[in-house]
Amino acid sequence: MTVNVLKYDPDIEVVPQAIIWRPLRYCTLVVRNGQDDLDRYQGASFTIGNDITFDLRVYEGHIHADVTVTLYLPEDVGDEEHVSEILALVIEEMAIPVSAVAWRRGQKFTFGKLERSRQDRLSEREARLIVLKIAASQPGHSATIEKLREEVPRYFDLSEADKKRSPSRPRELGWQIVVRNAMSSHMKGGQTIFAKGWAEKIPGGLRVTRQGIDYLNSIGFSD
Amino acid sequence: MRDIEYVPNDPFHRVENPTTQTKTIALMQQLSHEILGRPARGSGQPSVKAYPGKLTRDRGVEFTTDIEPMPGSAPNEARWYWEWSPGVEIRHKDGEDYACIAVTSFSNMQP
């Protein structure tokens, strides 16, 4: 299925149903500014198929606003099981790892407190998608390796584990090795962004192909 | 099963905005010991919305209440809906319905 970005505000009351430990720019480039009775926010509205509408928003006063995004569903979606099904579909279709979900409806919480899963750290699989997103957001849909490395921390809140120095390559941090491997064209066979046809190598970096842009459009990152 | 571990003495706050949390509204809240909220766009259900915790910006109001927020709340925002949250009352003002919660303490930091 495809995640479509809505170009207009659906004008319905929405209720927070999950908090994802990823910044808004990780999820989508199509961001609009809004304001309601609570506060000002940045966000986007999406649909999946004919039945599912959801918003991703970050209010200025949300805790961990720089590194989390809140998923909102229309107020008439109240059944916990249905909410859970929609959440599962959204994270699958937007290619968001399950470990990124810091809170979901039905899970106990204390106001003002949010804990990130200890399992949530940068994987090579996710790093492949992040470099694709970063390059797609750059002029000419291309980026140098230096630019990609510079931008990764803006797209992914690096955990302490990600920042540990590698014993085998002490000059690099763990996440930097993960990103380097993610850009490798000769590892993991058909799983690389190059083997999938989403990106091509250029001197010193990579360029996202039309196919890559189409894929990013299909997960709601761009339109 | 209750989702929220709610502590009645924990503070909530609302930040100043030009329409629903103005200086005048803050003064009315301070005098009445009540916070009112209208229905959101596209909704028929009035609700009060606030951030949990102490005020983190320069201007706004901070309060505590004995009324437990709705399960429709989340760790990063609290909501009190009329009819769905016990203790929330209804007020009619200028032809509109408002959800109303009584506060147990109130600090006006948008004088």
Image (cartoon, coloured by chain):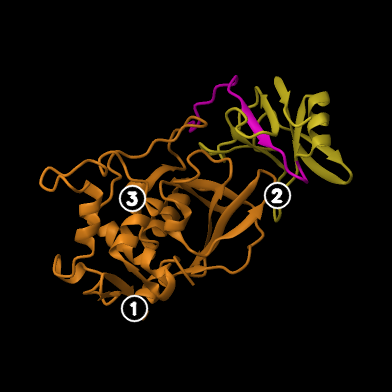
Chain colours: A orange, B yellow
* Residue A177 left/right relative to A199: left
Residue bearing mark 3: A98
Secondary structure type for disc 2: loop
The rendered magenta stretch, by its main secondary structure, is classed as loop
Looking at marks 1 and 3 on the same chain, the residue that comes earlier in the sequence is marked by 3
Q: CA distance from mark 3 to mark 2?
A: 31 Å
* Residue A84, x across and y down, in percent: 43, 50
Give the letter of the chain under mark 3: A
Q: Which residue is label 2 attached to?
A: B40
Residue at far bottom of view: A210
Type of residue at label 1? Thr
Q: What secondary structure is marked by label 3?
A: helix
Q: Is residue A223 visible?
A: yes
CB-based contact (under 8 Å), mark 1 and mark 2: no
Within 10 Å of disc 2 (Cα), the crowding (few <14, some 14-19, many 20+) is some
Distance between mark 1 and mark 3 Cα atoms: 27 Å
* Percent x, y of residue A128: 28, 62
The kind of residue tagged 3 is Val
**Residues in magenta, as a range:** B1-20
Dot 1: within a 10 Å radius of its alpha carbon, few (fewer than 14), some, or many (20 or more) residues? Answer: some
Q: Is residue A56 left or right of residue A122?
A: right
